[in-house]
Image (spheres, rainbow, N blue to C red):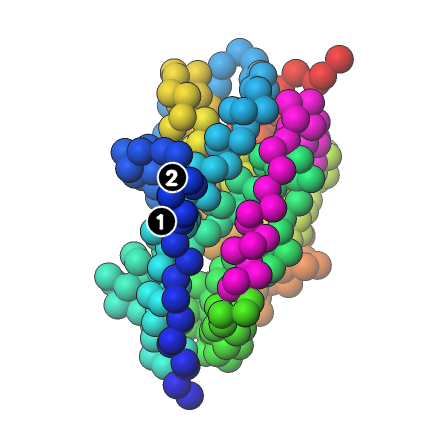
Amino acid sequence: MKFNLSCNTSKESPESVLFSANQCDALFAAVMVHDELYPEAKLPDAIHLDYSQEQLAQCYHLCQQLWLSSVDRTQLCLMIEKIYQQGFLSAEDKITYHGMRAKIKHLRFAYVTFDERHRYPTMFHWMTGVMGNLQDAFKHNQRPALVRSALLVRFLLTIPFYTLITKEMDCFQPSTPESFRNYVHNEINFIREHLTKNVITGKEFHEMRKVISRQVAMYDNLKTLYPSAYHRSISEYLSTLNGLMGSKHDELIAKKFDQSQDYYNDTFVIPDEIKQRLVNLTNKYIEPA
């Protein structure tokens, strides 16, 4: 099956260019090492969430500019066709695909964190999720799952759907400081609730890791726009957690594909190193009065 590749990439308008190339490059560099391990990273005594609405809006628009300026839809279409036809990507293409998906994921995280509604934009969320399923399928050599995911991603990349996706991202409404603080505390409380359980499922572990990933994305933006030792220390701690949880989740996905463990029903104990780091993180957040 040959895909139709006649597609025009949405480009940023001049008024959307708010940040320098160096800032965009710095953000992308941070996103690409969002699961790097810093074993000695330490958190500050307390984590505050005191940011203005303008700062929160700036965080989102930096992600949007990175996506608009550097995620080429035509190139992404070509990647999806290669995966569909070959079932794999060359080392160079893997790096390219991973980079494009990382920018897309990061924008989705930014939207849910910095938008007043704190929810994923529907079609952008679909596309990002299916791209993740596709990556898991070709990483674990699962041809049937790969074909299904490739066809679905390509469908979402057709001009009508991709146009709607880009319009979704233009509907951003910057969060108020109070709404932002409540959102983050709700995320941290979600982690706290799961830490009280003796055992959890693979799916529950994945939901916990997604909270950490959103936190990593948040501090990628904050340390890029507002560099400080405070932001850097939190970012490195979260990156370490994300890396440890990512490695564990890769194990769970492998067991899901070889059917040695039911991802949704079988349970396991959270590894002690991960659990202790999560407990330490949640203890640093001071609940709003």
Point 41% across, 47% down: residue: 13
Point 52% across, 51% down: residue: 249
**Residue at the right extreme?**
289
Range of the magenta residues?
A: 162-190
In the image, 233 versus 7, the foreground residue is: 7
In the image, 159 versus 92, the foreground residue is: 159
Assign the C terminus to one quadrant of the image. top right
Residue 168 covered by magenta stretch: yes
Point 49% across, 60% down: residue: 132
* Percent of width and height locating residue 286: 66, 16
Residue 50 covered by magenta stretch: no
Assign the N terminus to one quadrant of the image. bottom left
Task: Please tell me in which quadrant of the rendered image residue 94 appears.
Answer: bottom left
Dot 2 amino acid type = Val
- How busy is the neighbourhood of tag 1: few (under 14 within 10 Å), some, or many (20 plus)? some
Identify the disc placed on residue 17. 2
N-terminal of the pair, mark 1 or mark 2, is: 2
Q: Is residue 282 left or right of residue 228?
A: right
The correct choice, above or below, for 91 with respect to 26 in the image is: below
Q: Secondary structure at mark 1?
A: helix
Point 47% across, 55% down: residue: 250
- Cβ–Cβ below 8 Å for labels 1 and 2? yes
**How many angstroms separate mark 1 from mark 2 (CA)?**
9 Å
Q: Which residue is mark 1?
A: 69
The correct choice, above or below, for 215 with respect to 69 in the image is: above
State whether residue 62 appears in this view: yes
Q: Secondary structure at mark 2?
A: loop
* Percent of width and height locating residue 244: 46, 41
